[in-house]
Amino acid sequence: MVRKGFTGVTNKKPREYEKRHREIARTAGCEGMVFLKNERHALPLKKDEMVALYGSGAVITRKGGTGSGDVNEREVVNIRDGLKGKGIPIASEEWLSDYEKSYKKARTDWRDAIFRREKEIEKEWEARGDVSEYFSAKESAYYEIPFVAPAGSEIIENGSGVSKAVYVISRVSGEGADRKNEKGDYELSDGERHMLQMICGCFSQVICLLNTGGIMDLGFLEEFSNIDGVVFISQAGMETGNAVADVLVGDVVPCGRLADSWPYRYGDYPFADEFVAVNGQIHKSYYKESIYVGYRYFDTFGVSVRYPFGYGLSYTKFTFSEYGVSVAKNGDGENGIEVSLHVKNVGERYAAKEVAQVYVSCPQTGRGKEFRRLCGYAKTKELKPRESQELRIWIPFYALCSFSQEKGAWILDEGAYYVWIGKNIGDLELAARLDLEQEACFGKVGRIAPLKESLEELKPDAARLSARLLWCEETVERERITVLRVRAEDVVPGTGGGVLREAGSGDDSSPSIGRAGFDLEAKAAVRKLRRDQKVRMVTGELSYSVGNIGNSAIEVPGASGQTSKAAEEQGIPSIIFADGPAGIRVNQSYEVKDGEIVPYEVWDSLENGLLSIKKEREGEIYYQYCTSIPIGTLLAQTWNEELLFELGRLVSEEMRMFGITLWLAPGMNIHRNPLCGRNFEYYSEDPFLSGKMAAAMTRGVQADGGTGVTVKHFVCNNQEENRMGTDSVISERALREIYLKGFEIAVREAGPYGVMTSYNLVNGIHVGNSMDLCTTVLRNEWGFDGLVMTDWYTTEPAPEGFAKSTKPYVCVKARNNLIMPGTAEDQKNVEAALEDGRLTEEELDACVEDVVSVIFRTARAEKMDCKRE
């Protein structure tokens, strides 16, 4: 039953949408799991085949990471229950049951220890008579008492005739802390190694499931010869257990492909020892690797990897044939390359999907480049045995451009371009060579974020690259591969997403977004507002729950925040934000007493109530069950834009249901280093794949109008340690080609309603204060016409010895429109800047107009029947 004025329902029974949405989440989970190893027919399992199941993740299955990327779903299906649901007998039920009990006890003991510490902190601050820093001290208690998971009991010699064991290696990471290159995190713990030794000694075949948000060291595979199966199940949301069971028994044939390279060891990454979690240097991060990130580094520098980018096994086999490459225009009249090929399922038993990937080697003239970059891909439908499908992949010439810092422009260099087609970066065939007769410029742009100190960047071995290009030339000649002559007029930019506007041109059109300039209704509405109302409109609405970071909304318990109510009398409603990107993060339930929402503690929303310290509730309970979908990395591993579009539709339906206007997602920062604690929220090491995934998700959420996304964290949020104060020292070329590129694709192709700036600095300036990033790039170059908001509490005073904080009034000058979640201090800072002339009324109006323009596009405005003239 729904009560007017409160979100959610008072009936706890599952609703119709939950079943539908869980089925979509389960499908996505299956499609994004990647089979890394499958020998001696270890998989699929027979449905009546008894297996022994071990490992913490078997019963405490990790559906995702912690922090704002968490979701308070109805339940999480663990791997044990998923396998049992498929009729797989489990030989280790007693071990699993004992582990589950010991885990829950250890977890609640940990919670109680933190609660005691919290009380001590509270007394300490009360005695001082100053509670201004109480909440940050309270939050620190959570990290001061680390949770140590139980190891589980010994594995005894198997006497039941069971030959296969499944061992689940589980990891969890999250917002606010980075991973460690240590035992128990990137590497196996001593306890895990001991358990694997026992399991491998008791069973003839062992299958390892990696229930992790990202990469870990798999060196143990060389130690244990009977580990015949390895599956990167990742973290697939609330349906993880069911999705795992689907692929292990072959009801769904694995078709996920890696979105990252998996090296042999952590030290194989460039400048691995300089990452903050290794060297502890939290104040600056020097991007010395330049554009050579992920496979761009491994492939270019000849560093072998265990599993290459784009890799993944199946229960069947596919062949690629009949390659075709031609110069063509797309539907928008933009020039590019069309690649065609036939994909055939040559297996005899399983129907499955395959991913075709297209990479291009660009000329090494003009400036050094990676040897190959991903430029296009396509996923087949489910092909039956012996069935084939023709795929056509269109690549804009803009995707082949490199940024010239000297010219301040995107340049398509003169020379030979080699087109590769295959199943991953390590399994490619040379399909064509394109000879561009002269250089083409795709638009000059304003120089941004200049370096303020020297930066020695990594450069590839020119002789080695020359030898590889010579091999390409010999292959073209020997195998008579297609050679196309491309004239300068063939590559003139068309009217599609590859168009770059000249800096300062004043052209406000954006073909990808389809809107021109600011909304005229917003301009008219803002003209009616008083200055004090406008000042409030550039900050969030002040909330009683300050201190519960990420839970600052007033009207929807557990939502992150909302815009000001200052202008509601003028017909401008407040809109509400909720965290993502693994679903909508609001409280699973909340209490209403005497017509008011009862304030809640952060503990009440963690781990489905396992950590709640509330014993009884006196008021009426409302339930807000949201769907926990797979993490971003797993979604990228589907390589399926249609599927992400459907997930976006799922999220949009729940947003409308619970009164959410903007979803603080998708997350799309680059996996620069595997130890970044927030990588699980993000898609890939590759900007092209990241951008395509984010654009598909954005289109899904915004398909029906009224709800929108806020892509984040813009830009270079590549570490969590000192995320508010670290300075990313980076060249403009690396910034544009790698870290901004995914955002550019999402903005151009999908027109998100919002963008969230990251906490960090880029070359000495906080992103939230950067006119270069918030206006020059986003609006002037890409045509973005939405709102830009800060991450939460970006403008808090910086601790002594750290970089200065983001300044509220400078956010407004840079057209970072919303300071979230909003504090009285932020508003005073903006008012003072207006009084002394550091900020102009015109700059304030421009920011407010952006906010109001987005509000007027939303379902919230429609419901309030806004009066606009």
Image (spheres, rainbow, N blue to C red):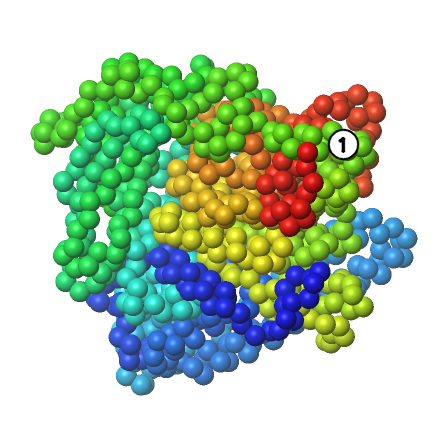
> From the viewer's perspective, is 109 left or right of 203?
right
Disc 1: CA contacts within 10 A as few (<14), some (14-19) or many (>=20)? few
Tell me the kind of residue under disc 1.
Lys
Question: Is residue 89 depicted above or below 425 in this figure?
Answer: below
Residue 566 visible in image: yes
The residue pinned by badge 1 equals: 528
> Image quarter for residue 155?
bottom left
> Image quarter for residue 188?
bottom left
Q: Position of residue 159 (x, y in %)?
A: 32, 85
Q: Position of residue 742 (x, y in %)?
A: 45, 37
Q: Position of residue 241 (x, y in %)?
A: 42, 68
> From the viewer's perspective, is 836 left or right of 477?
right
Viewer-proximal residue among 370 and 78: 78
Viewer-proximal residue among 137 and 628: 628
Viewer-proximal residue among 536 and 56: 536
Question: Is residue 548 depicted above or below 364 in this figure?
Answer: below
